[in-house]
Amino acid sequence: MGMFAEPVDDTAARVAAFEASLASVLSSRVVSPGFTPAGMRSTDDLQAGVVNVVLAREFDYGRAFGLTAIDAGTEVLLICHLQVDEDESCGRGELSTAVRAAELALLAEIKTFCRTKIDGIEVLLNSVEFSRQLEAPMGWLVATVEMRPPAASTN
């Protein structure tokens, strides 16, 4: 047995806590672990807004004092799908504007979530890409979110 305890790989626990907190903060949305294509979702789910939580990568492994893997960052993608009501009297421009508003509303909720404290996890929103409203009445956004242990725990 070595001088240091074996590092604990807690990525699964970190992601589970992240997903539970996300579902709590975005309670009016459909939060789903893993990815399900929009075409396989119900209209009701899409109109509520779907947030797929997809594990993307782990990075920045520390090398000090046996902390390898414990202090690593974990990146997830929030791949979000939504659909706005398609009113027959609504022109293409208004539909595009409605999709943009729906995407921005969902992003505002994601930003609120990223400011929420999750025990033992620091959450950072790194980037967001939008649908450019090209597929109205469907919209989507992909948010890149980073999770790390709180800075104080790795010093």
Image (cartoon, rainbow, N blue to C red):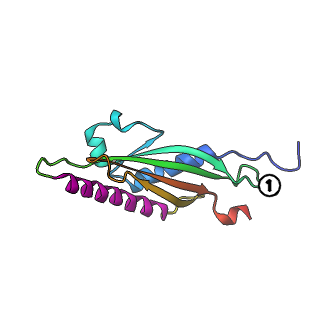
Secondary-structure class at tag 1: loop
Left or right of 24: which side holds 10?
right
- Residue 8 on image: x %, y %: 71, 46
The residue lying toward the viewer, choosing from 69 and 140, is 140
- Residue 42 on image: x %, y %: 29, 37
The residue lying toward the viewer, choosing from 79 and 137, is 137
Packing grade of label 1 (10 A; few <14, some 14-19, many >=20) is few
Image vertical order of residue 36 relative to residue 117, above or below: above
Left or right of 153: which side holds 43?
left
The outermost residue toward the left is: 89
Residue shown at 82% from the left, 56% from the top: 65
Residue shown at 36% from the left, 38% from the top: 38
Question: Which of the 4 image quarters holds residue 64?
Answer: bottom right
The region drawn magenta spans: 91-115
Image quarter of the C terminus: bottom right
The residue lying toward the viewer, choosing from 4 and 135, is 135
Image quarter of the N terminus: top right
Q: Is residue 4 magenta?
A: no
Residue shown at 34% from the left, 35% from the top: 39
Q: How many marks?
A: 1
- Residue 69 on image: x %, y %: 72, 49
Residue shown at 28% from the left, 54% from the top: 99
Residue beneath label 1, please?
Answer: 63
Q: What main secondary structure does the magenta stretch of the protein show?
A: helix
In the rendered structure, which amino acid carries the disc numbered 1? Arg
